[in-house]
Image: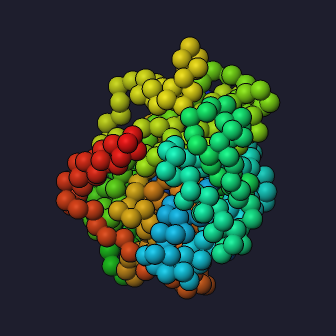
Amino acid sequence: MAGQGAPYPADSWYTATAHTLDPFPPLDGDIRADVAVVGGGFTGLSAALHLAERGVDVVLLEANRVGWGASGRNGGQVHSGQRRDVEWLEAHLGVTRAKELWSLAEESKQLLRDLVERHGIDCDLRHGIFSVAHKPRYVADEKKYVEKLRRDYGYQEIEWIERDALADALGTDVYFGGMRDGGAGHLHPLNYALGIARAAAAAGARIHEGTEVTALEGSDTRVLVTPRGRVSADTVILAGNGYLDGIEPDTETRVMPMNNYILTTEPIGAGVAGGILKGGEAASDSRFVIYYWRPTPDGRLLFGGGETYSRKLPSDVRAFVRRHMLNIYPDLGDVRIDHAWGGTLAVTVNRLPYIRKLRTGVYVGAGFSGQGVTIAPLAGKVLADAITNAPARLDAFADLPCPPFPGGKWLRAPTLAAAMTWFALRDRL
């Protein structure tokens, strides 16, 4: 459809299995709203849904299609906790804050389950994730981490799995043990995003796809500028994550886009007895640049691995990811790769989310650093809460440290690439 922006990635398994949702019209002319949301991913869609359900006149602007960015391209893993583990959070923020952030992450998982049930979102939600040690030196600390979560955080859904039992569960013996989290899970993220969009529109949110925001202007009234019209609003939520270039310069210095890549194999019986991940769980490992994988409902292996730090994708994404997959499953060398795609997520320096009020009438939710399936929908709800009747809901996130990336806008990518190369080398030692 003309004017709808870029289509969903053609070589994505998510695109191939997405539920139908009629396109929303591009903005055409100047309009007014109580709240304007920039970005149609998990954060923006959740904010629009929760605001509309409270009777707020909300407009959401998406440059391409809802769920087009990281929300519709990721590994679909719903992890427990924040991107940083509780030991790091305790050391840097204190035990009280660490437990508060853990509780918010648990609320995030419950919100996901509630949204799926309340709105009848068909997104293949399944339970269970393995977090596995790729080096023997990590085993002792990960065992202690399981004990800590059970003892200090009252989280009984997690258990340690020894190497032989883990190999049987994963279908590979390259790992040295791991944690099984029965309270975590995985889903089809694009169908989840489409379901939230459908619910938001039904609640009264006005959604415009194919509508790129090029500038944020105004003081007393915020004005979002697009090629075919302007949106005036009392309040703006910036929820574009890795796609906020040129809109909010200070946020750009703190939230950096990077690319990650995924493939799916032909159907190989994954996720059932006798196959890879025979119990249906997902998995991710202890590498800094992690590998993550899960079975699909049609028996494929969905595998993610490898990162780049510019907007340019590798010329052959299949080959780029396949070599990582064969590190874990060398017997799949002759298996056909049916889909492969990349996507842009956004990270912060310390991997903590950037969720706060920037100034009067302007809020941001971004920088989920690979934890967006879990945290981003809650970020949208918390921002909706803060705008309507519960500003204190932002407090737990608003004072989290989020320093700028070294090097500023132009040098941050090569600086990060150099750092990530060092971490990748450490992973191999």
- How many marks the image carries: the answer is 0
Image check: 367 left or right of 410? right
Whether residue 367 is situated above or below residue 268 in the rendered picture: below
Indicate the position of residue 128 as horizontal and vertical percent values. Answer: 71, 49
Q: In the figure, residue 223 lies in which quadrant?
A: bottom left
For residue 41, say whether it is visible: no
Residue 363 visible in rendering: yes
In screen coordinates, is 390 left or right of 6? right
Residue 332: image x %, image y %?
Answer: 58, 20
- The residue that appears at 59% across and 17% down in the rendered structure is 335
Please give the name of the residue rendered at 35% of the width and 30% of the height, measured from the top-left corner: 314
Return the residue nearer the eye: 368 or 251: 368
The image's colouring method is rainbow
Q: Indicate left or right for 104 with 65 as reference.
A: right
State the image coordinates of residue 286 (x, y, percent, origin top left): 50, 48
Say left or right for 35 vs 378: left
The x and y percentages for residue 339 are: 54, 26
Q: Quadrant of the C terminus?
A: top left
* Residue under the image location 63 percent in, 69 percent down: 148
- Residue located at (40% from left, 44% from top): 427
In front of the other: 340 or 271: 271
